[in-house]
Image (spheres, helix red, strand yellow):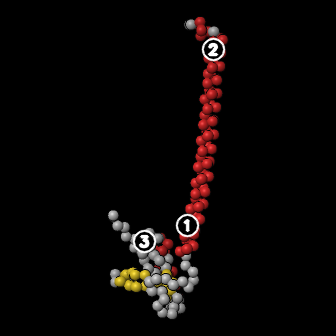
Amino acid sequence: MLPEQNDPLNSQFYSSNLSKKLQVVTISLLICSVVLNVMLANKTRRLGALLLTFKAKVLAVKAEQSLVPGALLPPIEARDLDGHPKLVEYNSGDLPTVLYVFTPPCSWCAKNVSNLKTLAEKTKGRYRVIGPYLLIISENI
């Protein structure tokens, strides 16, 4: 064995030196953690403000696009079940029109078909019930 290995003062020096290095590393990691947390908090706050602004804009657009009772709508150019062109007008006749729009991926639309048929039967002569089915056609551009 080397004499330095048996020297208690020398081993205390290495132990003390190692302990100081661990403290420096630990404190450095804590400082990095605090800095990163402050940065993330600032980013989260900015994103939260941006999200609130976005929600406000979406609500404003929805308010602009929402219909009020009695509003007149332009006619819809569509095709009937046989594929023939059909113009759906809301102001034709004296009956108010109920429009229930179906779309292919909508599971609730499929579940409500019988309800819509019942509604049309029960309100016949008082309301005109129309259930257009929207096809979403994807074009590869």
Among numbered discs 3 and 1, the one appearing first in the sequence:
1
Q: Is any atom of residue 81 visible in this view?
A: no
Q: Is residue 50 above or below residue 6?
A: below
Q: Is residue 108 left or right of residue 24?
A: left
Check the picture and name the quadrant holding the C terminus.
bottom left
Among numbered discs 2 and 3, the one appearing first in the sequence:
2
Cβ atoms at labels 2 and 1 below 8 Å apart:
no
Q: Of helix, strand and loop, which one carries label 2?
A: helix
Front in this rendered view, residue 57 or 99: 57
**Real-space CA distance between mark 2 and mark 1, rounded to the nearest whole angstrom:** 69 Å
Q: Tell which tag, 3 or 1, sits nearer the viewer.
A: 1
Q: Is residue 11 above or below residue 43?
A: above
Label 2 crowding class (10 Å Cα cut-off): few <14, some 14-19, many 20+?
few
Q: Tell which tag, 2 or 1, sits nearer the viewer.
A: 1
Residue 100 tag number: none
Residue 11 tag number: 2
Front in this rendered view, residue 17 or 53: 53
**Real-space CA distance between mark 2 and mark 3, rounded to the nearest whole angstrom:** 78 Å
Identify the residue position indicated by label 1 in the image: 58
Residue 104 tag number: 3
Check the picture and name the quadrant holding the N terminus.
top right
Q: Of helix, strand and loop, which one carries label 1?
A: helix
Amino acid carrying label 1: it is Val
Residue 101 at x, y percent in the picture = 47, 77
Residue 98 at x, y percent in the picture = 51, 84
